[in-house]
Image (cartoon, rainbow, N blue to C red):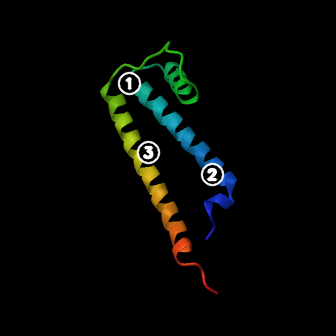
């Protein structure tokens, strides 16, 4: 079985795809909340890639609160899943060395 560490380009691609999905989903959430597409894209870009300038601030809407809750839960679930999967893949090699 191949380790994720043996293919750094896969990690880069996965990270880039994840960022693209977050960028698109967050832009769609702002757009659905009533922002113009350009303002939503601008806000997400500033939020994701910088600390923001403070010239646009989100208004509190049910759609944004729901999106934030779902994003936090999904992100937490994914991080826990990755940690458990890595631990499961590493521990058997540390506890029971492969015997030939």
Place of residue 94 in the rendered image (x, y in percent of width and height, measured from the top left): 55, 71
Query: Residue 18, located in which quarter of the rendered image?
Result: top right
Disc 2 packing (10 Å; few <14; some 14–19; many ≥20): few
Report, in whole angstroms, how far the alpha carbon at label 3 lies from the one at label 1. 22 Å
Report, in whole angstroms, how far the alpha carbon at label 3 lies from the one at label 2. 17 Å
On residue 58, the disc is none
Disc 1 packing (10 Å; few <14; some 14–19; many ≥20): some
Name the residue that disc number 1 marks. Answer: 33
Residue at the spot 62% in from the left edge and 59% down from the top edge: 4
Residue at the spot 42% in from the left edge and 30% down from the top edge: 29
Residue 64 vertical placement versus 39 (above, below) = below
Please tell me which of labels 3 and 2 falls first in the chain: 2
Q: How many tags in the picture?
A: 3
Observer-nearest residue: 85 or 42? 85
Please tell me which of labels 3 and 1 falls first in the chain: 1
Place of residue 89 in the rendered image (x, y in percent of width and height, measured from the top left): 53, 67
Q: What is the residue that sits farthest to the top in this orientation? A: 55
Residue at the spot 32% in from the left edge and 24% down from the top edge: 61
Name the residue that disc number 3 marks. Answer: 75
Name the residue that disc number 2 marks. Answer: 11
Please tell me which of labels 1 and 2 falls first in the chain: 2
């Amino acid at each position: 079985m191949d380790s994720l560490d043996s293919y750094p380009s896969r990690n880069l691609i996965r990270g880039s795809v994840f960022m693209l999905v977050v960028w698109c989903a967050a832009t769609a959430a702002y757009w659905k909340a009533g922002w113009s597409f350009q303002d939503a894209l601008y806000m997400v870009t500033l939020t994701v890639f910088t600390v923001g300038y403070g010239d646009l601030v989100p208004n509190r809407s049910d759609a944004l609160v729901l999106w934030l809750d779902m994003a936090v839960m999904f992100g937490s679930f994914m991080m826990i899943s990755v940690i458990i999967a890595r631990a499961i893949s590493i521990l058997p090699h540390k506890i029971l060395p492969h015997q030939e």
